[in-house]
Image: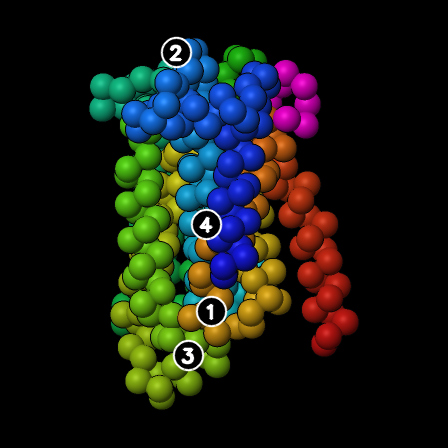
Amino acid sequence: MVGLTVLLVVSMGVGVFAGSADIGLGEVYRAVAGQFGIGSGVDANTAYIVVDLRLPRVVEGAVVGAGLALCGAVLQSLTGNVLADPYILGLASGASVGATAVLTLGTTVAGLAGGPAVSVAAFAGAMLALLTVFAIATTRTGALLPGRLILAGVAVAQAGAALSAIMILRADTGAADRVMRWTLGSLAGARWSTMPLLLIVVLVAAAVIVLVSRTLDAFAFGERSATSLGVNVTATRWLLYSIVSVCTAVMVAHSGIIGFVGLVVPHAARMIVGPLHVRLLPVVLLVGALLLVWADVLARTVVAHQEIPVGLVTAVIGVPAFVWLLRRRGGAA
């Protein structure tokens, strides 16, 4: 934990330093220190790049990476599905419908336009998809069975993908390009003004999930075993599914759809500390934050004077890692 925390702090420092603008390490330090009245500071342009563009981007990368990894770990435990990720309940598809509607049709949302309208529409679409999945999957007794939930999520995701495709086909080339970039995820829109909501949602979700970490251990042995251990399975599932879904919807609204973090990181963390959630979840948070911070650094620097979507970087990193994990599991079996 100490080593991962130190590595994360150093990585965030590298993230603030890295970028297309040639800003030295000393200037970065003076720009940040100047915000606290320490030292003489730097010129306004350098301060803007470091403090208003790079620093919130690095913080958002760490928060979103930690949140996606945490949500993936919880869903894998609740559903008993090793392929579960934060988008398994159709949230990504619903968010894509909302964002696509704004980007292709140019509609406003609650009087907002541009980036804020896209974020609000994406969140609304994700929550609508979630409610639809819950309505389909809930049994007459009010239970949320993992198998029904996953199937409902797949169905809603397919419907959302079809709606998005229809809007894209009717849109011009520029709008289609904007939709594609949004669906691949980006931290370029990170600003301090939108950070408090994201931080609060992820921190509250993490606190609640860590508090019920021992309850999550009971699900490893199946629903009957969890019930015999005194766990209210239905209430726990409703609580955790709701928290994880809202957290994921907020992250997607801020950063678009960033894949593989919530799928690969929980498996990697289990290899480090084992399956007990009281140890697993903190490591998942730190490793997820590390992965996305470095993915964003690569997205900004791997191609000179051009930024590539961070979702492409996580896919390039995540696919080989996932294949290796699958082969390692197969060998162990």
Quarter of the image where one finds residue 297? top right
Which numbered disc, 1 or 3, marks the residue closer to the eye? Answer: 1
What residue did someone put label 3 on? Answer: 218
What residue did someone put label 1 on? Answer: 279
**Secondary structure under the numbered disc 1 in the rendered image:** helix
What residue did someone put label 4 on? Answer: 66
Mark toward the start of the polypeptide (2 vs 1): 2
Circles 2 and 4, Cβ within 8 Å, touching? The answer is no
The span shown in magenta is 301-309
Mark toward the start of the polypeptide (1 vs 3): 3
Real-space Cα separation, disc 1 to disc 3, in angstroms = 15 Å
Which numbered disc, 4 or 3, marks the residue closer to the eye? Answer: 4
Check the image and name the residue furthest to the front.
39
What residue did someone put label 2 on? Answer: 44
Amino acid type at image mark 2: Ala
The quadrant the C terminus occupies is bottom right
Check the image and name the residue furthest to the left.
110
Amino acid type at image mark 4: Ala
Real-space Cα separation, disc 4 to disc 3, in angstroms = 23 Å
Residue in view at x 22 percent, y 24 percent = 110
